[in-house]
């Protein structure tokens, strides 16, 4: 594929991308000296061969350059510049061991001739996880007064990495990765996993060889369901998601009904959406009646002429995190993490980069916003770590700012590039891609127990079904969860049109109000508490909706009064505003507001109290532009119980406010 760098290439960095600019810069410097005879060799033939090798190297003819340099060194075995250039050739041809040996020889020949040899040897040792050796060579480099300033800055950073790694290896974390097995992994490469909040569906990228061109690859999405605790055979998602171009880095919505991912539009009108803006763009598809829709370019402020990739969609559906190449870049050699927010009109805000605790002058990628909404995991080579890409976490502070990046430590992080981390909703399990020994082929997906100190905030998932209370027909309907304490909307979503089912994630430790509505139906209200909820099982709440018919009534479960009083509590405002909106939408309805008590206390006082509570609700509605002519009130006292008055739970249910449709 001509226009899209594969996601597996993004996943794994090479030495070439790290060093090539530096090596060419140094090569031009050495070339100038050689042309003026300023080398450690006096053998003119050797110098001529060296100059020839420089030209071959600049034109990336590595094999030819290696042969010519070997000839130069045969003529002059102590030719430091030739030995150094040979090390550069070995770096670019990814022969790390030979490169180290060449730098060692060059240093032995003349330790002071080329100070940069200490720097590059130190970096190679760091890349191989030889931290003590790396520290030794980098320390030697920074002691040279004439050390290259740019390399000096990087050397100090790498020394910090070496010191961090040496200490981290002294206190390793428990880490026993388990391969997800042959139903997920194959002889090909698997990476970038995403999962629904119930942990029963996993989606990932698999790299497959092109049948017509064995040297080329195509990336497709595969999906697997968990049945009785076992992952089933992963299946290709097929059209319209998978195409002849690469699809990568998927992010599933909490309920698995929406997917955002990265792709390119080299053939123009890809997926029926807009033309791409450049490089790779972010697309979305929605599952409608169990079928994925044609992908649509997110467009707007999100996609630009830079590279946008590796999205992570928040569980509340309000934020999208993703990786963008730095300004003017058409590739992902360097990227930062951005976030865009969903606006009330359905558009996305202008993406903003995360703060300096997350983004660095280096490379950030593979971002995951956990379902708790307050913890992100990401990979970076710009923070202090074990060398290369390490995995970090950060959490929102009380001011809504991302806190310091915390390295996940050794051996979760190592001298290799770590990436593609997925943390389960319950925070106990992490899944990542690795090419460690013993796999099925290349990169496989593994899971491991996440150490507690890197765990996110506890969440549970909230599931249920919305249906017609008369016919039991599943309904696709809007529902909203609100924080009872603040009145703020936590999640707004829709149940599935075909099944009526919904699946979302919720932080524990809060009290919630649930409201659901659909045209032609009375709205539904309920409240529940997750303050002390410790179970790993989901919280289930089915939602029967009553059609709008004369005589139909519902309990307003989120209207609260002080004990034995009729003053409305602040928590009631959420519910009352829903009732106001319902009456404004159905402007011909006349309703009765009924107040009810339990049977404790004086019968007459209960009647009066229930009447006053009904009137308090009426007064709120009138203040919010609902005509008093449409509102009738009645106090029922304890005359119409709906539960057993001999129990505390029953009494609480009987203390209620209802509304009934009197006239359509």
Image (spheres, helix red, strand yellow):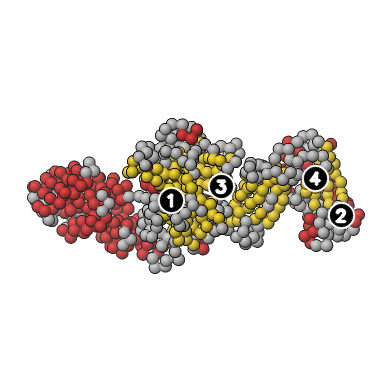
Check the image and report above or below for 612 versus 530: above
In the picture as drawn, the residue positioned furthest to the right comes out as 604
Residue at image x 86%, y 52%?
Answer: 640
Residue 638: give its label.
2
Label 3 – label 4 distance at C-alpha: 34 Å
Q: Describe residue 361's horizontal placement relative to residue 423 as left or right.
A: left
Residue at image x 42%, y 44%?
Answer: 219
Label 2 – label 4 distance at C-alpha: 17 Å
Dot 1 and dot 3 residues touching (CB under 8 Å): no
- Residue 126, image x and y in percent? 32, 58
Q: Describe residue 15's horizontal placement relative to residue 276 as left or right.
A: left
Label 2 – label 3 distance at C-alpha: 46 Å
Nearest the eye: 48 or 96? 96
Nearest to viewer (mark 2 / mark 3): 3
- Element type where label 4 sits in the image: strand
Q: Which residue is mark 4?
A: 553
Q: Which residue is mark 1?
A: 191
Q: Residues within 10 Å of mark 4 (few under 14, many from 20)?
A: many
Residue 256: give its label.
3
Nearest to viewer (mark 1 / mark 2): 1
Q: Residues within 10 Å of mark 3 (few under 14, many from 20)?
A: many
């Amino acid at each position: 594929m001509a226009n899209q760098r594969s996601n597996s290439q993004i996943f794994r960095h090479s030495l070439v991308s790290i060093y090539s600019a530096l090596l060419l810069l140094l090569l031009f410097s050495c070339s100038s000296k050689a042309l003026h005879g300023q080398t450690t060799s006096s053998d003119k033939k050797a110098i001529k061969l060296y100059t020839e090798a420089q030209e071959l190297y600049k034109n990336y003819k590595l094999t030819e350059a290696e042969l010519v340099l070997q000839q130069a060194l045969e003529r002059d075995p102590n030719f430091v510049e030739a030995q150094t250039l040979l090390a550069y050739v070995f770096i670019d041809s990814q022969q790390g061991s030979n490169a180290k040996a060449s730098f060692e020889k060059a240093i032995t020949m003349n330790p002071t001739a080329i100070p940069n040899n200490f720097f590059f040897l130190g970096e190679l040792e760091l890349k191989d996880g030889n931290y003590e050796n790396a520290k030794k060579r980098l320390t030697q480099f920074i002691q040279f007064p004439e050390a290259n300033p740019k390399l000096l800055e990087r050397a100090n950073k790498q020394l910090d990495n070496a010191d961090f790694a040496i200490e981290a290896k002294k206190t390793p974390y428990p880490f026993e990765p388990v391969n997800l097995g042959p139903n997920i992994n194959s002889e090909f490469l698997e990476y970038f996993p995403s999962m629904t909040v119930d942990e029963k569906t996993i989606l990932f990228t698999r790299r497959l060889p092109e049948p017509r061109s064995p040297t080329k690859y195509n990336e497709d999405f595969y999906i697997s369901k968990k049945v009785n605790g076992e992952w089933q055979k992963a299946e290709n998602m097929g059209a319209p998601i998978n195409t002849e171009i690469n699809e990568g880095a998927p992010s599933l919505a909490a309920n698995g009904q929406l997917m955002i991912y990265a792709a390119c539009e080299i053939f123009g009108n890809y997926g029926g959406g807009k033309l791409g803006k450049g490089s790779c763009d972010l697309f979305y598809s929605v599952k409608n009646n169990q079928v994925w829709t044609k992908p649509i370019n997110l467009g707007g402020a999100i996609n630009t002429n830079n590279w946008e990739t590796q999205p992570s969609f928040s569980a509340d559906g309000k934020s999208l995190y993703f990786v963008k190449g730095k300004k003017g870049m058409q590739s992902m050699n360097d990227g930062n993490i951005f976030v865009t927010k969903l606006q009330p009109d359905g558009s996305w805000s202008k993406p903003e980069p995360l703060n300096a605790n997350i983004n660095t002058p280096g490379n950030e990628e593979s971002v995951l916003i956990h379902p708790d909404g307050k913890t992100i995991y990401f990979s970076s080579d710009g923070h202090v770590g074990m060398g290369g890409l390490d995995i970090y976490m950060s959490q929102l502070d009380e001011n809504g700012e991302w806190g310091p990046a915390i390295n996940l430590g050794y051996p979760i992080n190592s001298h290799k590039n770590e990436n593609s981390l997925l943390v389960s909703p319950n925070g106990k399990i992490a899944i990542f891609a690795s090419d460690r020994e013993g796999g099925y082929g290349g990169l496989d997906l593994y899971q491991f127990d996440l150490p507690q100190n890197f765990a996110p905030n506890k969440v549970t998932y909230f599931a249920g079904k919305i249906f017609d209370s008369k016919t039991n027909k599943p309904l696709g309907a809007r529902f909203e969860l609100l924080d009872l304490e603040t009145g703020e909307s936590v999640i707004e979503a829709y149940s599935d049109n075909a099944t009526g089912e919904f699946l979302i994630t919720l932080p524990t430790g809060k009290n919630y109000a649930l409201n659901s509505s659909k045209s032609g139906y009375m709205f539904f209200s309920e409240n529940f508490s997750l303050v002390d909820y410790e179970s790993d099982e989901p919280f289930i709440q089915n939602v029967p909706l009553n059609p709008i018919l004369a005589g139909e009534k519902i309990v307003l479960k989120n209207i609260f009064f002080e004990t034995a009083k009729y003053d409305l509590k602040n928590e009631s405002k959420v519910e009352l505003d829903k009732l106001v909106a319902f009456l404004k939408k159905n402007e011909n309805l006349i309703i009765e507001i009924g107040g009810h008590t339990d049977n404790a206390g004086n019968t007459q006082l209960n009647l009066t109290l229930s009447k006053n509570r009904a009137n308090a609700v009426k007064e709120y509605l009138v203040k919010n532009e609902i005509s008093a002519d449409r509102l009738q009130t009645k106090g029922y006292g304890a005359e119409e119980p709906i539960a057993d008055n001999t129990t505390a739970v029953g009494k609480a249910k009987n203390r209620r406010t209802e509304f009934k449709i009197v006239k359509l």
